[in-house]
């Protein structure tokens, strides 16, 4: 999986919980997620620091962080449409995947 972003506050699952993916059977490249994201099984979610593998790429993003920082290195020439200007806000615009028909 490449260049995906997970901005939720919490990810809960029965097993194989990660910030961006759960059970990793492939290669992860350039994915990003909130560093303060809580992950784990129900009622046992916790913030992971210094994660690796499926918990890697925790980055300090919060409301008010510039979109150009959140989505840096996300090429609009490949899978992503426009990277919105301005800051990350609740309900704000996010990039979208290109239609690869």
Image: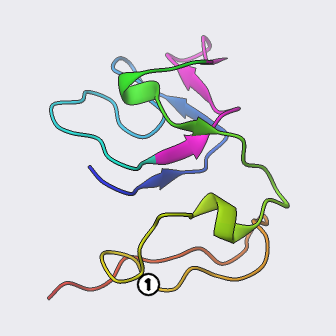
Toward the right, the furthest residue is 64
Residue 26, compared with residue 87, is above or below; it is above
Position of the C terminus, as image quadrant, is: bottom left
Q: Residue at horizontal 48%, vertical 64%?
A: 73
Q: Is residue 49 left or right of residue 88?
A: left
Name the one closer to the observer, 14 or 68: 68
Q: Which residues are magenta?
A: 32-49
Give the image location of residue 97, x and y in percent.
Answer: 37, 76
Q: Is residue 41 magenta?
A: yes
Label 1 neighbour load within 10 Å: few <14, some 14-19, many 20+: some
Tell how many labels. Answer: 1
Q: Is residue 44 left or right of residue 23?
A: right
Residue 31, compared with residue 99, is above or below; it is above
Toward the top, the furthest residue is 44
Under circle 1, the secondary element is loop
Q: Residue at horizontal 73%, vertical 70%?
A: 91
Give the image location of residue 17, x and y in percent.
Answer: 41, 24
Name the one closer to the observer, 12 or 34: 34
Quarter residue 25 falls in: top left
Residue 65, compared with residue 45, is above or below; it is below
Instruction: Check disc 1 and report the residue beneath it.
Output: 81
Give the image location of residue 3, x and y in percent.
Answer: 38, 57
Q: Is residue 9 left or right of residue 51?
A: right
Name the one closer to the observer, 11 or 97: 97
Q: Is residue 39 magenta?
A: yes
Quarter residue 54 falls in: top left
Q: Residue at horizontal 26%, vertical 86%?
A: 99
Give the image location of residue 16, x and y in percent.
Answer: 33, 20
Q: Residue at horizontal 26%, vertical 49%?
A: 1
């Amino acid at each position: 999986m490449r260049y995906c972003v997970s901005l939720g506050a919490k990810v809960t699952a029965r097993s194989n919980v990660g910030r961006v993916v759960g059970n990793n059977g492939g290669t992860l490249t350039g994915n990003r997620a909130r560093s303060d994201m809580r992950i784990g099984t129900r009622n046992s979610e916790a913030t992971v620091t210094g994660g690796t593998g499926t918990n890697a790429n925790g980055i300090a993003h919060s409301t008010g962080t510039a979109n150009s920082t959140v989505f840096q290195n996300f090429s609009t020439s490949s899978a992503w449409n426009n990277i919105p200007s301005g800051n990350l806000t609740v309900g704000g615009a996010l990039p979208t995947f290109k239609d690869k028909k």
